Protein backbone atom coordinates (compact mmCIF):
# COMPACT_ATOMS: atom_id res chain seq x y z
CA UNK A 1 0.00 0.00 0.00
CA UNK A 2 3.02 2.33 -0.11
CA UNK A 3 4.45 4.27 -3.01
CA UNK A 4 7.66 3.13 -4.67
CA UNK A 5 11.07 4.29 -3.48
CA UNK A 6 12.26 5.23 -6.99
CA UNK A 7 10.67 5.92 -10.34
CA UNK A 8 11.29 5.62 -14.06
CA UNK A 9 11.69 8.74 -16.22
CA UNK A 10 8.29 7.91 -17.76
CA UNK A 11 6.58 7.98 -14.34
CA UNK A 12 8.27 11.26 -13.41
CA UNK A 13 7.34 12.75 -16.79
CA UNK A 14 3.69 11.83 -16.22
CA UNK A 15 3.78 13.28 -12.70
CA UNK A 16 5.30 16.55 -13.99
CA UNK A 17 3.20 16.59 -17.18
CA UNK A 18 6.29 16.99 -19.37
CA UNK A 19 7.82 14.80 -22.06
CA UNK A 20 9.79 11.70 -21.13
CA UNK A 21 12.66 12.93 -23.30
CA UNK A 22 12.88 16.09 -21.17
CA UNK A 23 13.19 14.05 -17.98
CA UNK A 24 15.86 11.82 -19.54
CA UNK A 25 17.77 14.92 -20.67
CA UNK A 26 17.62 16.37 -17.14
CA UNK A 27 18.87 13.07 -15.78
CA UNK A 28 21.78 12.92 -18.22
CA UNK A 29 22.75 16.52 -17.44
CA UNK A 30 22.68 15.86 -13.71
CA UNK A 31 19.76 18.22 -13.10
CA UNK A 32 17.96 15.21 -11.61
CA UNK A 33 20.30 12.94 -9.70
CA UNK A 34 19.70 9.44 -11.05
CA UNK A 35 20.59 5.88 -10.13
CA UNK A 36 21.10 3.10 -12.66
CA UNK A 37 19.83 -0.48 -12.47
CA UNK A 38 22.09 -3.42 -13.30
CA UNK A 39 20.55 -3.33 -16.76
CA UNK A 40 21.49 0.35 -17.18
CA UNK A 41 17.97 1.77 -16.80
CA UNK A 42 17.51 5.14 -15.11
CA UNK A 43 15.76 5.21 -11.71
CA UNK A 44 14.96 8.40 -9.80
CA UNK A 45 14.80 8.00 -5.98
CA UNK A 46 12.15 10.04 -4.21
CA UNK A 47 14.71 12.15 -2.32
CA UNK A 48 16.36 13.12 -5.64
CA UNK A 49 12.98 14.04 -7.08
CA UNK A 50 12.35 16.23 -4.02
CA UNK A 51 15.70 17.99 -4.58
CA UNK A 52 14.85 18.59 -8.25
CA UNK A 53 11.42 20.04 -7.46
CA UNK A 54 12.88 22.42 -4.89
CA UNK A 55 15.84 23.56 -7.02
CA UNK A 56 13.66 24.22 -10.10
CA UNK A 57 10.65 25.61 -8.22
CA UNK A 58 8.41 22.90 -9.67
CA UNK A 59 5.72 20.73 -8.12
CA UNK A 60 4.00 17.53 -9.15
CA UNK A 61 0.98 18.09 -11.39
CA UNK A 62 -0.22 14.47 -11.18
CA UNK A 63 1.08 12.76 -8.01
CA UNK A 64 -0.93 9.63 -8.86
CA UNK A 65 1.63 8.87 -11.58
CA UNK A 66 4.11 7.90 -8.84
CA UNK A 67 1.52 6.25 -6.62
CA UNK A 68 0.33 9.19 -4.54
CA UNK A 69 -3.45 9.28 -4.32
CA UNK A 70 -6.20 9.92 -1.81
CA UNK A 71 -7.75 6.53 -2.55
CA UNK A 72 -4.48 4.75 -1.78
CA UNK A 73 -4.24 6.54 1.56
CA UNK A 74 -7.84 5.74 2.46
CA UNK A 75 -7.20 2.07 1.71
CA UNK A 76 -4.16 2.13 3.97
CA UNK A 77 -6.09 3.91 6.73
CA UNK A 78 -8.79 1.26 6.59
CA UNK A 79 -6.23 -1.55 6.81
CA UNK A 80 -4.61 0.12 9.82
CA UNK A 81 -8.01 0.52 11.48
CA UNK A 82 -8.87 -3.15 10.97
CA UNK A 83 -5.40 -4.11 12.17
CA UNK A 84 -5.82 -2.15 15.40
CA UNK A 85 -9.20 -3.80 16.02
CA UNK A 86 -7.69 -7.25 15.59
CA UNK A 87 -4.69 -6.45 17.77
CA UNK A 88 -2.18 -7.07 14.97
CA UNK A 89 0.19 -4.68 13.20
CA UNK A 90 0.64 -4.12 9.45
CA UNK A 91 4.03 -2.42 9.87
CA UNK A 92 7.36 -3.49 11.30
CA UNK A 93 7.65 -1.55 14.57
CA UNK A 94 11.26 -2.57 15.10
CA UNK A 95 12.18 -1.39 11.62
CA UNK A 96 10.39 1.90 12.18
CA UNK A 97 12.25 2.37 15.45
CA UNK A 98 15.58 1.87 13.71
CA UNK A 99 14.66 4.33 10.95
CA UNK A 100 13.53 6.90 13.51
CA UNK A 101 16.83 6.64 15.38
CA UNK A 102 18.78 6.99 12.13
CA UNK A 103 16.80 10.11 11.28
CA UNK A 104 17.36 11.50 14.79
CA UNK A 105 21.12 10.93 14.57
CA UNK A 106 21.27 12.65 11.16
CA UNK A 107 19.21 15.58 12.41
CA UNK A 108 21.44 16.06 15.47
CA UNK A 109 24.53 15.90 13.25
CA UNK A 110 23.04 18.40 10.80
CA UNK A 111 23.27 15.91 7.91
CA UNK A 112 20.51 17.32 5.71
CA UNK A 113 21.10 14.91 2.84
CA UNK A 114 20.67 11.87 5.10
CA UNK A 115 17.62 13.49 6.72
CA UNK A 116 16.07 13.95 3.28
CA UNK A 117 16.75 10.31 2.44
CA UNK A 118 15.22 9.13 5.72
CA UNK A 119 12.12 11.30 5.47
CA UNK A 120 11.51 10.42 1.80
CA UNK A 121 11.94 6.70 2.51
CA UNK A 122 9.45 6.94 5.39
CA UNK A 123 6.99 8.80 3.19
CA UNK A 124 7.45 6.25 0.41
CA UNK A 125 6.71 3.42 2.84
CA UNK A 126 3.71 5.02 4.55
CA UNK A 127 2.23 7.23 1.85
CA UNK A 128 0.95 10.00 4.14
CA UNK A 129 2.20 13.23 5.62
CA UNK A 130 0.42 12.42 8.89
CA UNK A 131 2.62 9.35 9.36
CA UNK A 132 5.74 11.45 8.73
CA UNK A 133 4.51 13.93 11.34
CA UNK A 134 3.25 11.60 14.07
CA UNK A 135 5.56 8.60 13.74
CA UNK A 136 8.85 10.14 12.57
CA UNK A 137 9.09 13.84 13.42
CA UNK A 138 7.15 13.90 16.71
CA UNK A 139 9.16 11.16 18.49
CA UNK A 140 12.39 12.59 17.08
CA UNK A 141 11.77 16.08 18.48
CA UNK A 142 10.53 14.62 21.76
CA UNK A 143 13.81 12.73 22.10
CA UNK A 144 15.89 15.76 21.04
CA UNK A 145 14.02 17.90 23.57
CA UNK A 146 14.84 15.47 26.35
CA UNK A 147 18.52 15.38 25.34
CA UNK A 148 18.62 19.18 25.32
CA UNK A 149 17.00 19.46 28.77
CA UNK A 150 19.49 16.94 30.13
CA UNK A 151 22.41 18.94 28.76
CA UNK A 152 23.41 16.31 26.20
CA UNK A 153 22.71 18.63 23.26
CA UNK A 154 23.44 22.28 22.57
CA UNK A 155 20.67 24.72 21.71
CA UNK A 156 22.10 25.22 18.22
CA UNK A 157 21.62 21.53 17.42
CA UNK A 158 17.91 21.64 18.27
CA UNK A 159 17.40 24.89 16.35
CA UNK A 160 19.37 23.61 13.36
CA UNK A 161 17.24 20.46 13.37
CA UNK A 162 14.10 22.59 13.24
CA UNK A 163 15.42 24.56 10.27
CA UNK A 164 16.33 21.37 8.39
CA UNK A 165 12.86 19.96 8.98
CA UNK A 166 11.17 23.15 7.82
CA UNK A 167 13.11 22.97 4.54
CA UNK A 168 12.28 19.28 4.06
CA UNK A 169 8.59 19.85 4.81
CA UNK A 170 8.61 22.55 2.14
CA UNK A 171 10.08 20.02 -0.30
CA UNK A 172 7.45 17.41 0.63
CA UNK A 173 4.74 19.98 -0.06
CA UNK A 174 5.81 19.99 -3.71
CA UNK A 175 4.73 16.34 -3.94
CA UNK A 176 1.15 17.27 -3.06
CA UNK A 177 -1.26 18.17 -5.84
CA UNK A 178 -2.44 21.78 -5.97
CA UNK A 179 -6.00 22.12 -4.62
CA UNK A 180 -8.87 23.15 -6.87
CA UNK A 181 -9.97 26.78 -6.81
CA UNK A 182 -13.35 25.59 -5.53
CA UNK A 183 -11.81 23.67 -2.60
CA UNK A 184 -12.70 24.82 0.93
CA UNK A 185 -10.26 27.12 2.71
CA UNK A 186 -8.35 26.33 5.89
CA UNK A 187 -6.38 29.06 7.63
CA UNK A 188 -4.34 29.26 10.79
CA UNK A 189 -1.12 29.90 12.65
CA UNK A 190 0.32 30.23 16.15
CA UNK A 191 -0.38 33.03 18.61
CA UNK A 192 2.03 35.56 20.13
CA UNK A 193 4.70 33.97 22.28
CA UNK A 194 4.61 30.74 20.24
CA UNK A 195 7.44 30.88 17.67
CA UNK A 196 7.48 27.19 16.73
CA UNK A 197 7.05 26.66 12.99
CA UNK A 198 7.38 22.91 12.39
CA UNK A 199 3.93 21.90 13.68
CA UNK A 200 2.31 24.82 11.87
CA UNK A 201 3.94 23.86 8.56
CA UNK A 202 2.85 20.25 8.99
CA UNK A 203 -0.74 21.26 9.70
CA UNK A 204 -0.85 23.21 6.46
CA UNK A 205 0.48 20.31 4.40
CA UNK A 206 -2.02 17.92 6.04
CA UNK A 207 -4.89 20.13 4.84
CA UNK A 208 -3.42 20.42 1.35
CA UNK A 209 -2.96 16.66 1.14
CA UNK A 210 -6.68 16.35 1.95
CA UNK A 211 -7.56 18.72 -0.91
CA UNK A 212 -8.00 22.03 0.95
CA UNK A 213 -6.78 25.46 -0.05
CA UNK A 214 -4.70 26.93 2.76
CA UNK A 215 -3.42 30.23 4.13
CA UNK A 216 -0.66 29.84 6.71
CA UNK A 217 -0.54 33.06 8.74
CA UNK A 218 2.77 32.15 10.35
CA UNK A 219 4.07 31.94 13.89
CA UNK A 220 3.83 34.21 16.94
CA UNK A 221 0.98 36.31 15.50
CA UNK A 222 -1.26 38.17 18.01
CA UNK A 223 -4.67 36.56 18.31
CA UNK A 224 -6.22 39.94 17.55
CA UNK A 225 -4.47 39.92 14.16
CA UNK A 226 -5.43 36.29 13.50
CA UNK A 227 -9.04 37.33 14.10
CA UNK A 228 -8.77 40.13 11.53
CA UNK A 229 -7.56 37.60 8.94
CA UNK A 230 -10.36 35.14 9.80
CA UNK A 231 -13.01 37.84 9.36
CA UNK A 232 -11.52 38.94 6.03
CA UNK A 233 -11.12 35.51 4.40
CA UNK A 234 -13.90 33.54 6.17
CA UNK A 235 -12.24 30.09 6.08
CA UNK A 236 -14.27 26.95 6.63
CA UNK A 237 -11.70 25.88 9.25
CA UNK A 238 -9.36 28.03 11.32
CA UNK A 239 -6.55 26.10 13.02
CA UNK A 240 -4.54 27.25 16.03
CA UNK A 241 -1.34 25.37 16.80
CA UNK A 242 -0.27 25.82 20.44
CA UNK A 243 3.23 24.53 21.22
CA UNK A 244 4.22 27.16 23.79
CA UNK A 245 2.31 29.35 26.26
CA UNK A 246 4.20 31.90 28.37
CA UNK A 247 1.30 32.81 30.67
CA UNK A 248 -1.70 30.46 30.94
CA UNK A 249 -4.17 33.00 32.29
CA UNK A 250 -3.22 35.69 29.79
CA UNK A 251 -3.51 33.17 26.96
CA UNK A 252 -6.94 31.99 28.14
CA UNK A 253 -8.20 35.57 28.28
CA UNK A 254 -6.99 36.35 24.76
CA UNK A 255 -8.25 33.03 23.43
CA UNK A 256 -11.70 33.55 24.94
CA UNK A 257 -12.05 36.89 23.16
CA UNK A 258 -10.76 35.35 19.92
CA UNK A 259 -13.12 32.35 19.98
CA UNK A 260 -16.17 34.48 20.89
CA UNK A 261 -15.54 36.94 18.05
CA UNK A 262 -14.70 34.33 15.42
CA UNK A 263 -17.31 34.62 12.63
CA UNK A 264 -20.24 32.22 12.69
CA UNK A 265 -19.64 29.28 10.38
CA UNK A 266 -15.88 29.22 10.92
CA UNK A 267 -14.85 25.97 12.62
CA UNK A 268 -12.08 26.46 15.21
CA UNK A 269 -9.67 23.51 15.42
CA UNK A 270 -6.94 23.54 18.07
CA UNK A 271 -4.05 21.27 18.98
CA UNK A 272 -0.52 21.25 20.37
CA UNK A 273 1.49 20.00 23.31
CA UNK A 274 0.88 23.17 25.37
CA UNK A 275 -2.88 22.50 25.55
CA UNK A 276 -2.87 20.50 28.76
CA UNK A 277 -5.77 18.66 30.38
CA UNK A 278 -6.06 21.60 32.78
CA UNK A 279 -6.34 24.23 30.06
CA UNK A 280 -8.64 22.58 27.53
CA UNK A 281 -11.81 22.53 29.69
CA UNK A 282 -11.50 26.32 29.99
CA UNK A 283 -11.48 26.84 26.21
CA UNK A 284 -14.26 26.97 23.63
CA UNK A 285 -13.45 25.37 20.28
CA UNK A 286 -15.05 23.18 17.62
CA UNK A 287 -12.53 20.33 17.63
CA UNK A 288 -9.32 19.33 19.39
CA UNK A 289 -6.73 17.09 17.70
CA UNK A 290 -3.90 15.53 19.67
CA UNK A 291 -2.27 14.06 16.54
CA UNK A 292 -2.00 14.98 12.89
CA UNK A 293 -3.61 11.67 11.95
CA UNK A 294 -6.71 12.92 13.74
CA UNK A 295 -6.45 16.23 11.92
CA UNK A 296 -6.06 14.41 8.60
CA UNK A 297 -9.21 12.37 9.29
CA UNK A 298 -11.12 15.53 10.21
CA UNK A 299 -9.93 17.36 7.07
CA UNK A 300 -10.91 14.46 4.81
CA UNK A 301 -14.31 14.06 6.48
CA UNK A 302 -15.05 17.77 6.25
CA UNK A 303 -13.82 17.85 2.65
CA UNK A 304 -16.26 15.04 1.89
CA UNK A 305 -19.16 16.92 3.45
CA UNK A 306 -19.27 15.08 6.78
CA UNK A 307 -19.78 16.99 10.01
CA UNK A 308 -17.99 16.67 13.31
CA UNK A 309 -20.00 15.92 16.41
CA UNK A 310 -18.81 17.11 19.79
CA UNK A 311 -15.96 19.43 20.76
CA UNK A 312 -13.21 16.84 20.67
CA UNK A 313 -12.13 14.14 18.24
Image (tube, rainbow, N blue to C red):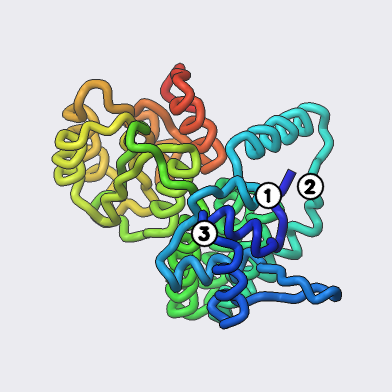
Inspect this view and state whether residue 249 appears: yes
CA neighbours of label 1 inside 10 A, class few (<14), some (14 to 19), many (20+): some
Towards the viewer: 260 or 115: 115
Q: Are marks 2 and 1 in contact (CB under 8 Å)?
A: yes
CA neighbours of label 3 inside 10 A, class few (<14), some (14 to 19), many (20+): few
Residue at the location (18% across, 41% down)? 229
Q: Indicate which disc, 3 or 2, sits on the residue closer to the N terminus.
A: 3
Disc 2 target residue:
91
Label count reads 3
Inspect this view and state whether residue 284 appears: no
Q: Indicate which disc, 3 or 1, sits on the residue closer to the N terminus.
A: 3
Disc 3 target residue:
18
Q: Nearer the viewer, mark 3 or mark 2?
A: 3
- Give the SS element for disc 3: loop
Q: Nearer the viewer, mark 3 or mark 1?
A: 3
Residue at the location (60% across, 71% down)? 48
- Distance, label 3 to label 2, CA atoms, is 35 Å
Picture coordinates of residue 286, whole percent (x, y): 36, 26
Residue at the location (43% across, 73% down)? 159
Disc 1 target residue:
126
Picture coordinates of residue 26, whole percent (x, y): 56, 75
Picture coordinates of residue 24, whole percent (x, y): 62, 71
Towards the viewer: 156 or 234: 234
- Distance, label 2 to label 1, CA atoms, is 9 Å
Q: Indicate which disc, 2 or 1, sits on the residue closer to the N terminus.
A: 2
Q: Is residue 168 above or below residue 218?
A: below
Q: Is residue 83 left or right of residue 113?
A: right
Q: Is residue 289 left or right of residue 144?
A: left
Amino acid sequence: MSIEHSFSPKQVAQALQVSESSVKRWCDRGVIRTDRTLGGHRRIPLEHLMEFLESTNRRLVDPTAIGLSEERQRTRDELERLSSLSGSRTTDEAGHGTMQKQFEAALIAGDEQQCRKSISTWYAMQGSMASVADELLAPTFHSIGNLWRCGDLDVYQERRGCEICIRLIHELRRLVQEPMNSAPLAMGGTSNGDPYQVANQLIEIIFREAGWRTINLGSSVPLESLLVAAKKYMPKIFWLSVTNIDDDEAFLKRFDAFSRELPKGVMLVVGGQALTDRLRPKMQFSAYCDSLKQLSALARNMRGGSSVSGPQL
